[in-house]
Image (tube, grey):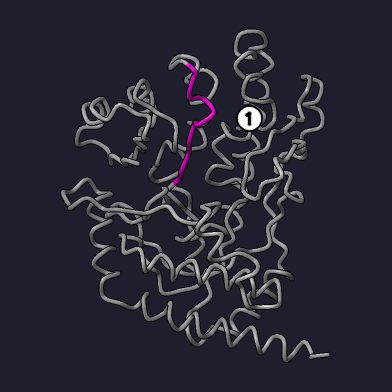
Amino acid sequence: MKSKFLSDQHDVEILRDLARQYAEIAHDPVQNERRCLWSRHNSLQPTRPLILVSVGGWNAWYREMFSERTLQCRDPFFRGHEDALRWYLLRQRIGDDFIFEPWFNLQASLNDGGGRLWGVAAGTVDSGVEGGACSFVPPLHTWDDMEKLRPLHHAVDETATARNAARLHDALGDILPVNVNRGCVYSGMEADISMALGSLRGLEQVMLDMYESPEELHRLLAFMRDAILVCQREAEEAGAFSLTTQQNQSMTYSDALPPPAPNSGPRQRKDLWAFCAAQEFTLVSPAMHEEFLLRYQLPILEKWGMVAYGCCEPLDRKFDLVTQHLPNLRLVSVSPWCDRAIAAEKLANRFVYAWK
């Protein structure tokens, strides 16, 4: 039987080879050109159109290239980082305007409630197809089930985080610095309320709740808003936010905010981008979108420096709503189901028009 040392050595050699390839890409002068372009673009200055290709997740061809059977590392920890490096190398071959940063990211071991961000989990009925659809059974069957909800507080398992950082640094540190992301577990789409609400109550039920149980729905939304605000405040007070714990579904560069940098905490939310969406409210009227979502998102988003709003949902009936209510809004999604002429008229030269 091979020793763990030999197994680690095998994995480290694989990772180091991939890291060298990545480092060469990350230090190419074209990355600085892209940084300048994205900074100008997100500062509302004229540039050529900047392109990002969405790749990864459950794209079938991606999973065929990088499935469990194609990865070579044996240790699950190194295997996960091998997958990340191979993903970056694939991106380079695409040739879009993605910026390859000269560091390697490690996610800190955060308290995630065992994957239950609200203390409960939906039951799922899987299709049996890898990457296929599934149906789910929302955990809040009645309003009494709200008693089961348990919001998460910001907490980092420092022992596990230090151990993982040391392993990665020993393997790759002389090639790429290791950047530890310690940001709040309620960030990005975990903090947009919309996605979590759909999972907790079910999409159809939420739409009925707006008519049949508005007071109870408001109580649930207030609970979620307050929990997110508390967790984010705890993370900020703990110095957990850095210039790499932010997102906007593109590149987080602009002239108004500090550029991304590794291990650059502590930072305040006002120094960073926030991303929020409302996909589950696609079929909801602008008035109800404001009453049952945006007014709860606003206290969260106003703490951040700049905001990117929207994902796959068409916002053509709601551009006035989001642009008038979010004073720090900068980037707005224009999804494939959105009327692009309306988007061009409403967003004009005041916002980044993110056509998808």
Quarter containing the C terminus: top left
Please indicate whether residue 40 sits to the left or right of residue 4 in the image: left
Residue at x 46% of width, y 43% of height = 275
Q: What residue type is labelled 1?
A: Leu
Q: Where is residue 5 in the image (x, y as percent from the top left)?
A: 74, 90
Residue 202 in which image quadrant: top right
Residue ranking furthest to the top: 212
Q: Is residue 7 magenta?
A: no
Q: Tell me how many marks there are.
A: 1
Residue at x 49% of width, y 20% of height = 283
Residue at x 49% of width, y 60% of height = 242
Q: Nearer the viewer, residue 286 or 50?
A: 50
Q: Position of residue 61 (x, y in %)?
A: 50, 57
Residue at x 34% of width, y 54% of height = 52
Is residue 279 positioned above or below 236 on the image? Answer: above
Disc 1 secondary structure class: helix
Q: Which of 157 and 341 is in front in this view?
A: 341
Residue at mark 1: 197
Please indicate whether residue 108 sits to the left or right of residue 126 in the image: left
Q: Position of residue 276 (x, y in %)?
A: 48, 39
Q: Does the magenta stretch include residue 280?
A: yes
Q: Give the range drawn in magenta.
A: 274-284
Is residue 242 positioned above or below 141 on the image? Answer: below
Q: Nearer the viewer, residue 72 or 13?
A: 72
Quarter containing the N terminus: bottom right
